Image (cartoon, rainbow, N blue to C red):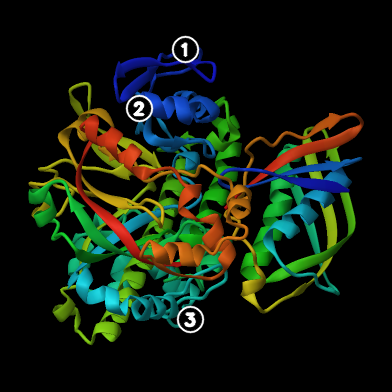
Amino acid sequence: MIVNGVQLNKITDELWEIPAHGNMRVPGRIYISRKMIEDQLQNDEAIKQVINVAHLPGIQKYSLAMPDIHWGYGFPIGGVAATDLDEGVISPGGVGYDINCGVRLARTSLHSDEVLPKLEKLVDSLFKNVPTGVGASGAIKKITPKELKSILSEGSHWAIKNDFGNDEDTQFTEENGKLKDADPDAVSERAIERGLDQAGTLGSGNHFLEIDIVDEIYDQKNAATFGLFPGQIVIQIHTGSRGLGYQVCDDYLKVLLKAEEKYGFRLPDRQLACAPVKSQEGKDYLGAMQAAANFAWNNRQIIMHLAMKSFMDTFGLSQHGLNFRLVYDVCHNIAKIEEHNIDGKIKKVCVHRKGATRAFAPGSSKIPLQYRESGQPVLIPGDMGRYSFVLSGTQKSMDETFGSSCHGAGRTQSRNQALKSAKGRDLVKELRQKGIYIQAKGIKTIAEEMPEAYKDVSNVVDVMHKAGITKKVARLKPVGVIKG
Amino acid sequence: MSYRFLDHTADIALEVYGSCYEELFESSAIGWREAVINLSVDGDEERRFYINENTPEELLVRFLDEMNYLLYSKRWIFDSIKTINIIGKNGQWQLDCLLTGAYFSDPSLIKEEIKAVTFHQMSIQKVNNEFTTRIIFDI
C-alpha cells in the first residue's frame, strides 16, 4: 500500500516494510496494524522520518518504528536504530530532548480496598511532597554545582547515598541506575545551571505520578514474578532529565550540525545531526547524554522515595509494613552501547531508542536475576483516564528490534483542541466520576492532558503482543494522579 | 511585526513575519514570549547579545535559545528590543541585539516549559516581499 506517498509492504499483520530506495542505507520497518496505518499514519509525516533515519551512516539492519509512531524531531517518536561503533554515528535526534525520559513502577502490599477510602488524603500528600510544575524547586536541599556533577556521575546511587532509598533499588533500575561512561565535564555550564534546582522534580506537560490499581492480569506467572496481584495498589512515575537534559541535547545538536560538514555527511533533516560514535564530538555527546540520563534516574529515585513517605504518613505504616518496593525503572529516550546479534555475529552497536523502551529477553545478563526467567518488565504508560500496561521482554525482541518495544501512546488532539473540548466541562468532576482523583498545578494542564487528547495505548500494546516482541503481563487502572 | 500560533498536536508552532530579518526576529521573540509567560514587565535592565552562525535559521534558533536560557535559568524576561541588527555576508550571519527587561520571582507566571527551539520546518523565505518562517517549540 501507499501511505503518504511511501510504498509500504506487508510482512505480517503487525509488521510493514519500506523498501530501501534512494539514499536509504537499509529498509524501514514499522510495527503497526493496518487500522492504525489508515487512522493515523496516513496523516503523519513520521513515515518519512523512518526513511530519513535510514540514511544514517553505519545503520544496521533496519530503521525501525514501534506502533506508537508519530512525528518527532529527527527520529520519529517510536523510532529505534542501531549503528555500527566503528563506521556508524550517534545522533541526539535519536534520543530526544528529554534524555532518559522514562517510567518507574513501584508496588505495595496494599489492596485498593484499603487505599480508596483515603485516596484524597494520599494524593493531596503526594501533591504537597513531590515538586511539580514549571519552576518548582527540588525537594532536596539546595545543591552546589559540584554536588550536581556527582549526581551526573552516580545517577540514582547519589539519591540512595543521601537517604532517598535502598541499595536494592538500583538492581531494579535499567543499567542499575547509572551509566558508567557518563562525563559530567562534557555537560555545559548552562545545562548545569538549568539542573541545579530541578533535582527531584516531576516537571509538567505529560509527566505524572499516578496511583494505579492492578486491574487485570494476563500472565499469572510473570505477574507473580514482578510482585503484582489483582487489586494491588502500585505507583507509576513518569519524568526525565528536565531542563538539564533539554540543554544537553540542544547544545550537542549544534555541535554535531557543525561536525556534519567536517565528516562530509549529508542528512535529509537538520535534527538528524550526527557524528561518528568514536569521534571526539560523538564521544562528548555520549558522555554528556549519559550524564543527563544519570540525572533522570536520580530524579525518579528521589520522587519514588518522596511518594513512599506520603504512603507512610497516610497509612501509618513503615516501608517494611507497606512492602514498598521498586518493580522496575525503564528509559524511553536514550542511546546506549549494547551487544546484539547482527547477521549471526555478536556485535557492539549504538542503539538509539527515541520513544521506545528496552525489552530484554529471559536469560539476559543485563536484567535482575529475579527476572531472568520472565524477561525484563516493560512499563507502558497510557493516559490518565484509561490504563497503562506492564509487559515483559522476549527473545523475538532481541532478534527483531535490538531488544526494543513501544513506550506509550501519542496525542490525537493538539493542546488547543483539547482546551476547546474542555470548555464548559468540569474535568476534575468527570475524572472523579470515573473514580480518579487528580491534583494538578492548573486546570489548563488537566485540559491539555485529558484522556481523549491521547490515543488508546491498548492498541499499541496489542500490536507488540501479537508481533511477539513483548508479552502483556498486567493492566493498571489509574485512581490518583498528580501533574505539574 | 506579526506572528500567529498554529495548531500543533504535541508542541507549540508559531508562524512569524517581518519586512526584514530584524522584524522577523522581533516577531519571533514576541511570539515566544506570549507562549511562555503570563507577565509583562517594565524592564530597565539591559542585556546585549552578539551571535554568529552559518545560516539565518541557526541564528534565529540561537537568538531564541538565549531568551529561553534567560527565562528558565535566570528568571529574566525581556520587555522590549531596543536595537537589533542582522548582517548576512560571505556565508556568515551575525546578530547584535540590545534588550531591556527585568527579573521576576514568581515561577508560576511561566506558562510553558519549552524544552528547545527546534529546526523542524524552519526555513526563512521571502514571500510577497515579506520574510516568514515557522518555528516549532518542543514542549
Please give the residue where the numbered disc 2 appears in the rendered image: A33
Q: In this view, does A349 lie to the left or right of B48?
A: left
Q: Is residue A15 above or below residue A114?
A: above
Alpha-carbon distance for marks 2 and 1? 23 Å
Q: Earlier in the sequence, mark 3 or mark 1?
A: 1
Q: Given the image, what chain letter belongs to the residue carrying mark 3?
A: A
Chain where mark 2 sits: A
SS of the residue at dot 3? Answer: loop
- Secondary structure under the numbered disc 1 in the rendered image: loop
**Residue name at image x 62 percent, y 58 percent:** A423
Task: Name the foreground residue: A202 vs A170.
Answer: A202
Picture coordinates of residue B24 (x, y %)? 84, 44
The relative height of residue A20 versus residue A388 in the rendered view (above or below) is: above
Say which residue label 1 marks. Answer: A21
Q: In which quarter of the image is residue B29?
A: bottom right
Is the residue marked by circle 1 packed among few (<14), some (14-19), or many (20+) residues within 10 Å? few
Q: Which amino acid does label 2 sit on?
A: Ser
Is A319 or A110 nearer to us in this picture?
A: A110
Going from N to C along the chain, the mark reached first, 3 or 2, is 2
Count residues near mark 3 (Cα–Cα under 10 Å), then give few for <14, some for 14-19, many for 20+: few
Picture residue at 79% right of the left edge, 65% below the top: B78
Q: Which residue is labeled 3 in the image?
A: A142
Position in image of residue A396 (x %, y %): 19, 31
- CA gap between label 3 and label 1 equals 54 Å
Q: How far apart are marks 3 and 2 (CA)?
A: 49 Å
Tell me which amino acid carries mark 1: His
Q: Earlier in the sequence, mark 2 or mark 1?
A: 1
Image position, residue A159 (x, y; %): 32, 73
The kind of secondary structure element at disc 2 is: loop
